[in-house]
């Protein structure tokens, strides 16, 4: 149990590292004052270009993946897998290093789910890509993938604790996209440009 608690705390602290903020700061930019003001990969991509956006995406993804791999390596029960995944996700969304104001959690959630169920991620990413190519909105694609992942996890993994974890993550991701949802309704959301 002590190992599980240590991993959960470590996951939160790792998740709290504000990748996009730190990378943008290295370029002399406060990403919170640029574009949408979000510290995630999409805003970094729009503000600093594709390469920097991809680096941010990978960094945020690893924050979710590494703790899950650690728990799997320790062969702890699924309750600790779920708790660690949630801790890493909450760390990114409510980072202690930026007064609990973080990103929207999509990339970190991606890392968590890669560690838990790679097959589920393939299905969710397929949904993301289809929605993005059809409507050109990263936010809509993210929301769609987030809404689908609990059902995919339920179908593939069939473990209640992991389904519950995915429901919490999905709900928070959608909630964190509230402004995007309003802009989508008003027709003022930013269109993805490759």
Image: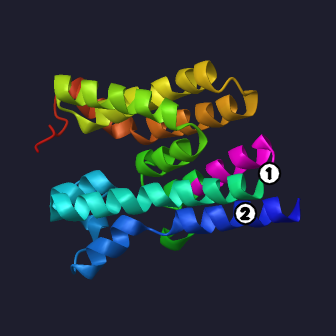
Few, some or many C-alpha atoms within 10 Å of disc 2 (few <14, some 14-19, many ≥20)?
many
The verdict on residue 83 being magenta is yes
Does residue 31 appear to the left or right of 133 in the view shown?
right
Q: Nearer the viewer, mark 2 or mark 1?
A: 1
The picture places residue 29, in percent across and down from the top left corner, at 23, 75
Distance from disc 2 to disc 1, alpha carbons, whole Å, reads 10 Å
Residue 94 appears in view: no
Report the residue marked by disc 1. 76
The residue located at (33%, 31%) in the rendering is: 128
Q: Residue furthest left?
A: 193
The quadrant of the image that shows the C terminus is top left
Stretch of the chain drawn in magenta: 76-88
Report the residue marked by disc 2. 7
Does residue 77 appear to the left or right of 147 in the view shown?
right
Give the numbered dot on residue 178: none
- Count of marks placed on residues: 2
Residue 83's place in the image compared with 49, above or below, is above
Secondary structure found at label 1: loop
**Which quadrant of the view contains residue 122?**
top left
The residue located at (74%, 33%) in the rendering is: 161
Front residue of this view, candidates 68 and 35: 68
């Amino acid at each position: 149990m002590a190992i599980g608690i240590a991993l959960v705390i470590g996951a939160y602290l790792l998740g709290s590292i504000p990748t996009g903020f730190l990378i943008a700061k290295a370029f002399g930019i406060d990403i919170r004052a640029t574009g949408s003001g979000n510290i995630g990969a999409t805003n970094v991509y729009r503000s600093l270009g594709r390469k920097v956006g991809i680096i941010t995406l990978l960094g945020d993804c690893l924050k979710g993946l590494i703790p899950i791999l650690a728990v799997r390596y320790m062969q702890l029960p699924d309750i600790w897998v779920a708790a660690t995944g949630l801790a890493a996700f909450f760390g990114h969304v409510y980072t202690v290093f930026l007064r609990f104001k973080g990103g929207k959690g999509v990339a970190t959630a991606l890392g968590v789910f890669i560690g838990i169920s790679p097959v589920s991620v393939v299905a969710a990413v397929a949904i993301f890509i289809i929605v993005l190519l059809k409507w050109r909105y990263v936010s809509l694609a993210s929301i769609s993938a987030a809404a689908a992942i609990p059902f995919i996890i339920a179908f593939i993994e069939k473990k209640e604790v992991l389904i519950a974890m995915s429901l919490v993550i999905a709900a928070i991701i959608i909630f964190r996209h509230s402004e995007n949802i309003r802009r989508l309704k008003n027709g003022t959301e930013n269109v993805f440009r490759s």
